[in-house]
Image (tube, grey):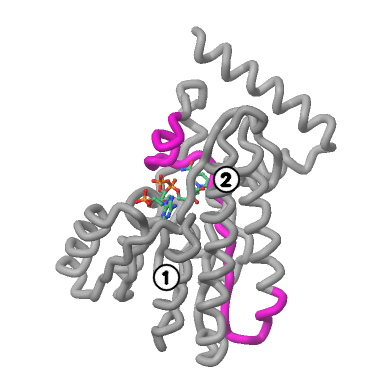
Amino acid sequence: MITGASSGIGETFARALAQRGYDLILVARRRELLEVIAEELSSAHGIHAEVLAADLALEEDAAMVAREIEAREDASMLVNNAGYTLEGPFAESDIERQLDMVRVHDLATMRLTRAALPGMIARRRGVVINVSSLGGFAPQLDNSVYCASKAFLIEFTETLHLELSGSGVRVQVLCPGFTHTGFHDAAGSDISGIHDWMWMKAGKVVEESLRALERGNVVVIPGRRNRFFRFLYRMPRPLLYRASLRLLEFAEDRKNK
Ligand SMILES: NC(=O)c1ccc[n+]([C@@H]2O[C@H](COP(=O)([O-])OP(=O)(O)OC[C@H]3O[C@@H](n4cnc5c(N)ncnc54)[C@H](OP(=O)(O)O)[C@@H]3O)[C@@H](O)[C@H]2O)c1
């Protein structure tokens, strides 16, 4: 099962897993997009792909998806990928949309993972991939709830890794940096200030995630540049705050040129 499979990284996971012969359950709100993807992948790879339209910010929808997982005796992989961001100062933000973000990123991930794990543990095999972000390692201006909700996923997954040691079930938290998808458009973000070299393709992100799975890596930061940023994020916090403010000014200058 892949959540947020109607576009971007989730859709790319669906394509990569279909190629490897996995049957799929695709979850997102835009049913029509999911149906087109499911049909294409079923006929291209001879797999079975189902569609589950759900808004994971709604408790009843998340519970319905969880029941679907519990009902499967063969659920082998869960990719908790659905997500979005809202940019802007927290003090001026729409609190309901911020709360929904936490519901989608964290509460739905908890619920679906809780539904998947008992069966996986009993079968002694299974994989859960939680899609976090480089933003989960350090504060990013105007992105407070996003960063905090992604940081939650890192701690959550690493702790599960410890709890599941020896169970045969593997967990991974995937932390991409800037990736070409519908993500920034959906947020209405102005990305003109971000250099081309900072971007990755969704295909590469997913490829690195699946490769890391074979190696058993738990925290996966795709791309050398992103790993370099992760390294920089370890600098003393006051320095990091100053650097973040400088970067913002730099991006603003670039936009205004
Ligand atoms: N792109 C980046 O630069 C980047 C960087 C770091 C991390 N990430 C993370 O990667 C993940 C995938 O994002 P993406 O870049 O692939 O963006 P995307 O193309 O916008 O895809 C987001 C997916 O999440 C689904 N989704 C959003 N809200 C949902 C809800 N309430 N219920 C169910 N599904 C929902 C969307 O489907 P519907 O609209 O059809 O519901 C869509 O399939 C996110 O968790 C994001 O935080 C992205």
Residue type, mark 1 in image: Val
The outermost residue toward the top is: 257
Q: Is residue 248 visible?
A: yes
Q: Amino acid at mark 2?
A: Arg
- Numbered marks: total: 2
* Residue 55 x/y as whole percent: 41, 56
Tell me which numbered mark, 1 or 2, is placed earlier along the sequence: 1
For residue 132, above or below residue 171: above
- Percent x, y of residue 257: 49, 7
Instruction: Where is residue 6? Give x, y as percent.
Output: 32, 54
Q: Residue at x 82, y 36 (%)?
A: 237
Residue at screen point 23% across, 64% down: 38
The quarter of the picture where residue 142 lies is top right
Residue visible at 70% across and 61% down?
Answer: 155
Give the labeled residue for mark 1. 65
Viewer-side residue, 71 vs 126: 71
Name the side, left or right, on which 94 lies relative to 157.
left
Q: Residues within 10 Å of mark 2 (few under 14, many from 20)?
A: few
* x 70%, y 38%: residue: 139
**Residue in front for this viewpoint, 211 or 144:** 144
Q: CA distance from mark 1 to mark 2?
A: 35 Å
Q: Is residue 243 above or below residue 225?
A: above
State the extent of the magenta-drawn residues as a range.
162-188
Residue 166 among those drawn in magenta: yes
- The quarter in which the N terminus is drawn is bottom left
Residue hosting label 2 = 224
| Left or right of 142 on screen, residue 198 | left
